[in-house]
Amino acid sequence: LYGHSLGGGLALGYAERFPDKVGGLFLIAPVGLGRGISQGFLRGFAVWTDSPQARAAFGKLVDNPARITQQMVARAMEQLQRPGARPALRAISDSLLEEEAAYRDSAAAVAALDLPRVVV
């Protein structure tokens, strides 16, 4: 299984539950490893009101904030204007924060398995 970020956390959970169906894991910055989920970023994403807020938040996700293009910011703001987007994002962020410990538990369980894995 391959997974990035939340997809990595889901891959960990799947491997924990069905280790006989997984030949190996390749995870990039999976949820469940590291310092934890950024509550401020998750909750803030749904309430951005302008491009400077979005640019500042995205800038925290990369090593060089200059890599955040105006096109990226504009696209994110455009998506936030879609009907139902903000309530859906709030529900997703609340769910992720509630399940954060479960992702860590899955990571610990998978670490004990005899399963090839690469984590980036």
Image (cartoon, rainbow, N blue to C red):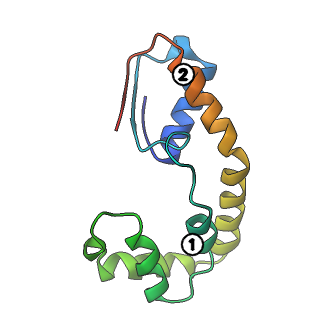
- In-image side of 88 versus 2 (left or right): right
Q: In front here: 34 or 66? A: 34
> In the rendered view of the protein, which quadrant contains the C terminus?
top left
Residue 13 location in percent, x, y?
60, 30
Q: Which residue is mark 2?
A: 110
Residue 17 location in percent, x, y?
63, 21
**Classed neighbour count for the residue bearing mark 1: other residues with Cα under 10 Å, few (<14), some (14–19), many (≥20):** many
Identify the residue at the far front of this view: 35
- In-image side of 87 versus 68 (left or right): right
Residue 82 location in percent, x, y?
58, 78
Amino acid type, callout 1: Phe
Q: Is residue 59 above or below residue 100?
A: below
For image coordinates 62% across by 62% down, the residue present is 39
Element marked by disc 2? helix
Badge 2 or badge 1: first in the primary sequence: 1
For image coordinates 66% across by 45% down, the residue present is 100
Whether label 2 touches label 1, CB < 8 Å:
no
**Classed neighbour count for the residue bearing mark 2: other residues with Cα under 10 Å, few (<14), some (14–19), many (≥20):** many
Q: Which residue is mark 1?
A: 45
Element marked by disc 1? helix
- In-image side of 79 versus 86 (left or right): left
Residue 64 location in percent, x, y?
27, 69
Tell me where residue 14 sits by quadrant. top right
Amino acid type, callout 2: Val
